Amino acid sequence: MTYRQTGIVQIGLTRDAKHNYYIDGNGPLPSVTTILRIVDKSGPLVGWAKRITAEAAVDHRAELEGWVQLGGRDGAVGFLTKAASTVTERAATTGANIHALAESITLGHDVTVTDEQAPFVAAYRQWLADFAPEFLAAEEMVCNVSVGYAGTFDAIVKIAGEMWLLDLKTGKGIYPDMALQLAAYGHSEFIGRAGEAVRFGIPPIDHYGILHVRPEGYELVPYDVGEAEFDAFLAAKRLYDWRQDREPKMMGQAIGPRLVNFPHAPAKEAIA
């Protein structure tokens, strides 16, 4: 991909609201999470969305007729299909809030939590008590200029003398392909900060893991991250770049008559 100068004088590694990254004003560089959206995860999500929609229909069966009268058939369908989006948006908001609270707790700040957040925070505090991690870095931006990506990892900690690169997850499940995200962070070239020209080194990582924090508790799950996982991430990056650069230019104008006007093939004559 080609990166441009923004015209704004910026020093160091910066990030905008859409999680595009810039190095000294040059960019944008796509984020690790943006690149990995190219990986198809629709299989499990389709079944999940169907269930959420069906549950919404059952839970709101008394209001369905009113929805049809108010917005017609399409309006009622829209109300139901929005149920899955609402759940997803709520989960994303919860995850972002727990990440922010965890960072504040890590820095030793007092935090105020809601009733919904309290069990997540209790689980995170329990992990801190059980493992006594030494934080070397938290919520730091990293970049790989050679490949062309950047991102923000959650933590690098030392546990029992060994270095862990961790990502905090708060959703119901964790999955094998999360290893690609960890691999991308681990293969970054440096840690960068806004307003600082210095590019900080990343310590050698002994272990990769997902810290899965839920209202019912936590689990620290090691991931076997190696060169194969980074190669898979690089494949996703190549496909991402193709979609950005080549896909919009791929199809030319149709040649010949439009399909809608194309005459049907003549019927075959019966064999005597």
Image (spheres, grey):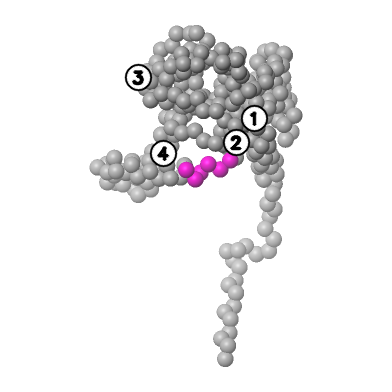
Q: Residue at the location (37% across, 46% down)? A: 77
Question: Which contiguous range is marked in magenta?
Answer: 39-44
Lower sequence index among marks 3 and 4: 4
Q: Amino acid at mark 1?
A: Ala
Can you give x and y, in whole percent of width and height, for residue 231 in the image?
Answer: 68, 37
Camera-near label (4 vs 2) is 2
Camera-near label (1 vs 3) is 1
Q: Amino acid at mark 3?
A: Asp
Kindly identify which residue carries mark 2.
36
For this rendering, which residue is in front, 56 or 64?
56
Question: Mark 2 and mark 4 in contact (Cβ < 8 Å)?
Answer: no
Vertical comparison of 203 with 69: above or below? above
Kindly identify which residue carries mark 3.
115
Q: Is residue 218 left or right of residue 115?
A: right
C-alpha span from label 4 to label 2: 21 Å
Residue 21 visible, this angle: no
Kindly identify which residue carries mark 1.
184
